[in-house]
Amino acid sequence: MAVSNGSMAVWCSLKQGGRKTEIETHFNYWRVAGTGQRAPGGLLRRDFLEVGVLLFDPSEINHISIFVPFVVAAETVEDLGTYFGDPDIAQGIFNEVLSSDKHSLSGEQWINLLCMDDSLFCRVHVFLKQNNSIDSSEICIKYEGGGTIITILPHAVESSSARLPVGGRLYFRLRIYAQPEQQSPFVNVITPTDRHFQSGFEEVEYVDFRLNEARTLPAPIERQMKRDAANGRASINRVAFLTAVPVLSELSVSNTAFYKNRLLEHDPWDKYVPGGIPQGMMVYHWRKGEPGQFVDDFTAFVKLQTRRTSNTILLIYLVIAFLFGIVGNLTASGIVALYQSYYAEKK
């Protein structure tokens, strides 16, 4: 089966003899390329996906697998753990009042996020680095089913959970970029064919995001999920999906009502997004499930309409209008000349 746009999968395999446990998953899709703005230095902006996995009982987890429906290069998978050293970023992601406490022991690193009463909210794993990529002892990248399986290996889980207090939760968060030449697997753009005949036009975009939807996942991924479930698999109790889009984009259709939306604050997100956030971004947030529940799959379909206009679009329109004017005048002059010539001959 071919990979459909936005078909993802996340699963956590239990250790042999491990008891049942739960996880929470977070997905952020940043539609920064849709603004048409360039980053400082004139570089083109690239959309990116972020995946967060919160383990409620990490001592029971063997490894975490994430399938994305496009080819991922190792150097384009970025660890976001270090960002949680900034309490503003941690609070913005978890929507909780938190403080950060960074630790390092025997080469392993993690960041504890603390509540107002200094109790542990969760621990954030910081991956080891190898050259410009995450160390191969903590992550594995495998191409399968037309996409990529990113596996957070047992070493990464154990290194941060070994000294975790009883009942403590462990969090991983990665940022994933598609290759520059690849079309976004989550966004399709429909541009009107008559756009050059208008000074501005409505462009339609739709975001199609799917998680663990069996009928749209490639067969090799389904088989891998079954193999990894030999010792059991952690249940997903909540899926949170957030997309950041240009404020000029109007949300016209959604398959389900969003949980909340807001204008994206410049601070602290400008230092969180590479090259800073473009001017004017809206955030839409959906979620499904609660602790104690089981979410087997999740879908989000969002249709956006964006008014596109710029100096280039206006210049093209004026040039075409000018050429049409010239052609129209020449045609009218030709018709008049033929008409006069015809009646001159009649006389």
Image (tube, rainbow, N blue to C red):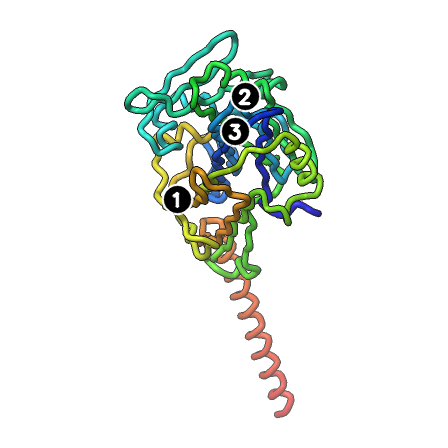
Query: Along the polypeptide, which appears first: circle 1 or circle 3?
Result: 3
Element marked by disc 3: strand
Query: Hey, what amino acid is under mark 3?
Result: Leu
> Label 1 crowding class (10 Å Cα cut-off): few <14, some 14-19, many 20+?
some
Q: Residue at x 61, y 43 (%)?
A: 183
Disc 2 to disc 1, C-alpha distance: 34 Å
Query: Along the polypeptide, which appears first: circle 2 or circle 1?
Result: 2
Q: As rendered, which of 150 and 339 lies closer to the eye?
A: 150
**What residue is disc 3 on?**
174
Q: Quadrant of residue 83?
A: top left
Relative side of 277 to 297, left or right = left
Residue 94 versus residue 207 in the image, above or below: above
The answer to whether residue 314 shows anywhere in this view is no
**What residue is disc 2 on?**
157
Q: Residue at x 56, y 16 (%)?
A: 129
Query: Hey, what amino acid is under mark 2?
Result: Val
Disc 1 to disc 3, C-alpha distance: 22 Å
The answer to whether residue 9 shows anywhere in this view is yes
Disc 2 to disc 3, C-alpha distance: 14 Å
The picture places residue 131, in percent across and down from the top left corner, at 60, 16
The picture places residue 191, in percent across and down from the top left corner, at 55, 55
Element marked by disc 2: helix
Query: Hey, what amino acid is under mark 1?
Result: Met
Q: Residue at x 61, y 92 (%)?
A: 347
